[in-house]
Image (tube, helix red, strand yellow):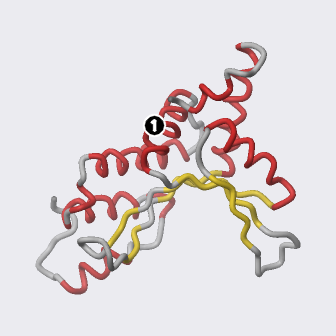
């Protein structure tokens, strides 16, 4: 099922197209396709990849995030208290379940394409999901490949996983696969 199936309740094709276009534009501006790699002592390699779509808004705009839950039929909205100069909490729509990302989120954004530089980030996100589908994240070489892809997104700071691997195993070249 693709996320646009949930907008079929809209009165007509024009309205469905408008809703899908609005969602694509909203996520293009406010969304983040992230690929964190973090320590997990229960994982076989002690590292876990957790691709996630996050869309953030102030708590007063939580209703638009709840709309995403309704349209996509997956994900949840969470509230985080801020400890900065903002006067209200932050609401975040998060989708982290692999099947939801693969079966709902990716098809939606392949059909309703992002238009900014976020399109390239989305493409890398999809590459990571496909590598995970091939179970590459369960091997050291696959984790390295995923970490290198994640490191190129948004001029991200170097991956802790790659830093640790490079510091402790100098014979492994992370650029070779």
Quick check: 16 above or below 28? above
Q: How many tags in the picture?
A: 1
Quick check: 13 above or below 117? above
Residue 99: quadrant of the picture: top left
SS category of the residue bearing label 1: helix
Q: Residue at x 72, y 70 (%)?
A: 80
Instruction: Give the class, few, some or many, for how many residues have Cα within 10 Å of label 1's Cα (few <14, many ≥20).
Output: few
Quick check: 105 above or below 148? above
Q: Residue at x 32, y 44 (%)?
A: 130
Q: Nearer the viewer, residue 62 or 21?
A: 62
Q: Position of residue 150 (x, y in %)?
A: 40, 60
Residue 169: quadrant of the picture: bottom left
Quick check: 117 above or below 146? above
As drawn, is 158 to the left or to the right of 89?
Answer: left
Q: Position of residue 61 (x, y in %)?
A: 83, 53
Q: Position of residue 147 (x, y in %)?
A: 34, 64
Residue 56: quadrant of the picture: bottom right
Q: Position of residue 177 (x, y in %)?
A: 16, 59
Question: Outermost residue toward the bottom?
Answer: 168
Q: Residue at x 61, y 28 (%)?
A: 4
Residue denoted by label 1: 103
């Amino acid at each position: 099922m693709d996320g646009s199936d949930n907008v079929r309740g809209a009165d007509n094709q024009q309205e469905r197209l408008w809703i899908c276009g609005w969602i694509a534009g909203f996520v293009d501006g406010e969304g983040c396709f992230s690929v964190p790699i973090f320590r997990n002592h229960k994982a076989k390699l002690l590292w876990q990849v957790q691709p996630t779509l996050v869309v953030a808004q102030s708590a007063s705009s939580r209703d638009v995030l709840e709309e995403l839950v309704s349209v996509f039929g997956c994900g949840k909205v969470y509230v985080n208290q801020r400890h900065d100069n903002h006067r209200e909490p932050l609401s975040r729509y998060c989708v982290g379940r692999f099947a939801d990302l693969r079966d709902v989120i990716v098809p939606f954004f392949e059909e309703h394409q992002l238009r900014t530089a976020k399109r390239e980030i989305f493409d890398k996100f999809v590459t990571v999901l496909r590598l995970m589908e091939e179970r590459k994240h369960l091997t050291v070489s696959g984790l390295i490949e995923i970490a290198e892809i994640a490191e190129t997104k948004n001029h991200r700071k170097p991956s802790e996983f790659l830093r640790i691997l490079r510091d402790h195993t100098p014979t492994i070249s992370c650029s070779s696969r």
